[in-house]
Amino acid sequence: MISLLIDGRPVEVAEGTTVLKAAERAGIAISHFCFHPAFVPEGSCRLCLVQIEGSPKLELGCSTIVREGMKVSTQSPIVREARRGVLEFLLAEHPLDCPICDKAGECKLQDYASDYGLTESVFREAKEKREKRLPIGEKLLLDRERCIQCTRCVRFLSEITKTHELGLFERGIHSEIGIYDGKPVRNGYSGNLVDLCPVGAITDTTFRFKTRPWFLARGESVCPHCSRGCNIYIDYHPGFPRVPGSAKVYRIRPRVNEAVNGPWICDYGRYGFVEAQNTGRSDRPFWNKGGAKTELSWDKVRIVLGEKLKALRESGRMGRAAVAASGWLTNEELYLIQKIFRDDLNVSRLFVVDPKPGEGDAMLLRPDRAPNRRGATELGFDLALPSLEALGRETEVLIIFGPHLAAHFGGDELRAAFDKIALKVLVTSHLAGLESLADCVLASATPAEKEGSFTNADGRIQRFAAAARPCPDVRPELWILQDLAREIGLRSDLYSRAASARTVFEALAKEIPFFGATA
Amino acid sequence: MTKAPKILTELFWLEHLHRIEAYLDRGGYQALKKALTEMKPEQVQEEVKKANLRGRGGAGFPAGVKWGFIPKGTDKPKYLCVNADEGEPGTFKDRYILNHNPHLLIEGIVLAAYAVGIHSAYVYIRGEYEMIARRLEQAVAEAYAKGYLGRNILGAGFDLDLVVHRGAGAYICGEETALLESLEGKRGNPRLKPPFPALVGLFQCPTVINNVETLSNVPFIVQKGAAWFLEQGLPKDGGTRLFGVSGAVAKPGLYELPAGTSLREIITTHAGGMKDGKKLKAVIPGGMSSPILRADEIDVRMDVDSIAAAGSMLGSGAIIVIDEGTPILHVLRKIAKFYAHESCGQCTPCRLGTSWIHKIVERMAAGGGTRGDVDTLIRLAGNIKGRTLCPLGDAAAMPVTAIAQKFRTELEATLERSPVWP
């Protein structure tokens, strides 16, 4: 261990640590643009300059390695003056179009300019004119006037994705970021460039000019689009009262978790998430009778389904019921399905139907497109697809969670089987075709809107809370299951609405050692 | 007048010196023979260290000490890079050596490589030196043919390959780490230091980088000894210096003089005094990046330490003489334009600072200067100096600061007729 003094505070860090990281340890933030913990230090923005006793020049915080007894000053007048100088240079040529810049409010240049009190400029010359909206990727635009050339984007593509789509061209004041020969950034991780850019130089066309960061609330969640379970922030607008549709998820961003996703997320999750959250939603329960939709209240749903299941149970035909669960359900919901249907009602046919696997990659995205397939496995679910023909023959009541059956079977096949089933209940957050074949469609919450936990492919159980506000007529599956259980007259503390996902998980952890050991 | 001992330039008068036969006739490659047959590598290195051979590229770092930084017993390959980029405005010394006596450099290269245990060397030559590069390539081919390069040199069991690589015209590629990047085929951006090239250099391996003139002195040190070499110059700065005198002097040209010769003597005696009887106004003593000296400041000895004490630097020994008829604003304009053009753009203060300074100076030259401009120039230059990733920032800032401070009155006089900003 090396001990040193930073701004008079004693710090002890491991050998080989940089001054910037040591300062972070002591709770001292050193301003920087080009430094990023995932990359090799570049040392080009010159903002992290610090004063080290005995050193004739200011040294870089990002790359200077700590030495025993070092005395570092991060706020001395000469350091502040040097940083002001760097910021003054950057602001001189900066377009200062903050009022129309997507990054305003979360821009590091803006923050530092305000920190260092740079309000007036002595720059009297003409600013360089540059490209303001250069497409560099499917959803990426580059504004070269705003760019401060920290080259984080270039280094992300050379060090992390190793796809090298961006480079630095020209030199001096004319140097600029660009793509080679018109070949756009295309690598499945391009959205990270927008998060990485400390200013508003790289913007996302799906977010551009749609809202301002300060209107957005931030929730923490886990991405459900593959079995990696990347940790994310959900930035959503809580909505204006009396403005229908104003509550909306605008974007997701990676939440650093070195054990899962590091500081990145993939484009499949990033854009898929927002798309899924805002479009194709099933937003209220309804009956499907001969092609006509009739809206249902949740009370009615509970009573009708309860009646039907009670009738089955009383006539000893519970074996004629089946449940198609899904790897999109949380551990807690899957556990309740087991408790209610397998243990209390003696339903033997519990299936798991997941989306079809897609393509994975070497970084984060996994072929499994269900966030909790591992959880279902550990709970003892049979992951084999049910035989549709047998299902139709032997089933009177079928409860389906999620729209994924339609991905595995053709419409005619499904119709043929479903026609033989008296009652098909579909619990889904999205309308993706299956609803036309179901008799009763219940609108459920997305993972972003509920609390619970997923077990990722590596067996890591990740708990999350409701991060975005659901539409009013949507309910988490946990509630739907609890309500139904009570309606049938089943008794357990877990079936009370007072039993939160956490309570359910505690019961699960007690029962199944896998969940107890890692919780 | 100092008697001019000629070492490097002694044989320059010979018409075909660049051919190996002529060089051999005049005792060429004898130092190499001596080293390979009589001396151990450490002895060569020790001799050069004792000779206090200061780097001729601009920084003045002792070459023997630099060689000593190369780690011993590493299993990585080691490289020698010869900096023949010679981009510092006003400098034209290396080209004379390369043009007249390329074998002297090659002999120096083999000696340095032998001293450090290197088997691959590169000469990074300025792209504009096309004819000289061809001449050097020819000399390299001759040296290979005669067994002074290649495998088992002079039968002493020492191997060295030498490649001549032409640059593409960027000033920044004369900065040693940018040179390495360029040599590796990348964009010529300087690297963040540490690590220094002695540990992590070309292809991530230990690398020595020396200037052409520096290495060309090595054969003489080996042949005649460190003591002799020190006698030619100063105890802390051995040997002679090639001074390239340009500007308003009667006899501009290259002068080989002992380190420590006075600047006044170089201008008034060797370079024949001022051209057409003009009056001296200022001197840039060590290439464009060195701080300017006023006419009353030229009684200074031209060696690394003395001129540093006088507030400037010896740099590459390129002396630019400016007469009274030259407006200092025009000098400043040339300087500002050059550095704004040649900044690689990698780090913030240099990329934006050099350009801002250039914009201000251009505005002043166009008659749009304002009262605060000179102070702004000094302040901006101060925000560049010492804050950049590589020495180009210092090189750009120092002359601006010096001119703005020493010629403030003249610069501000040009502002008198300018409108004042509201």
Image: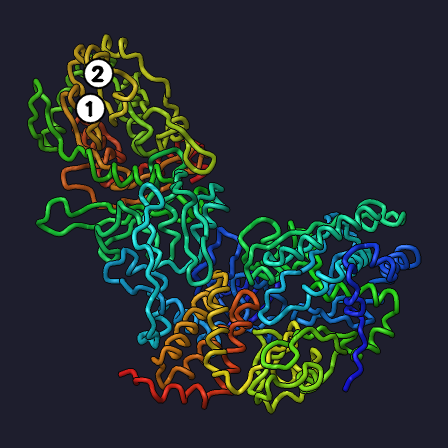
Q: Earlier in the sequence, mark 1 or mark 2?
A: 2
Q: Quadrant of residue A275?
A: top left
Q: Is residue B250 left or right of residue A33?
A: right
The x, y position of residue A64, in whole percent, is 57, 64
- For the question of whether residue B345 can be seen, the reply is yes
The x, y position of residue B12, in whole percent, is 77, 66
- Asked which secondary structure carries label 2, the reply is helix
Q: Quadrant of the N terminus of chain B?
A: bottom right
Q: Quadrant of residue A497?
A: top left
Q: Which mark is residue A25?
A: none
The x, y position of residue B94, in whole percent, is 68, 65
Asked whether A426 or B374 is in front, the reply is B374
Residue placed at 79% from the left, 74% from the top?
A: B239
Dots 1, 2 in contact, CB < 8 A: yes
The residue tagged 1 is A433
- Disc 1 versus disc 2: distance between alpha carbons? 9 Å
Residue placed at 59% from the left, 82% from the top?
A: B283
The x, y position of residue B250, in whole percent, is 64, 81
The amino acid type found where label 2 is placed reads Gly
Asked whether B404 or A208 is in front, the reply is B404
| Callout 1: chain | A
The residue tagged 2 is A411
Q: Is residue A179 above or below residue A391?
A: below
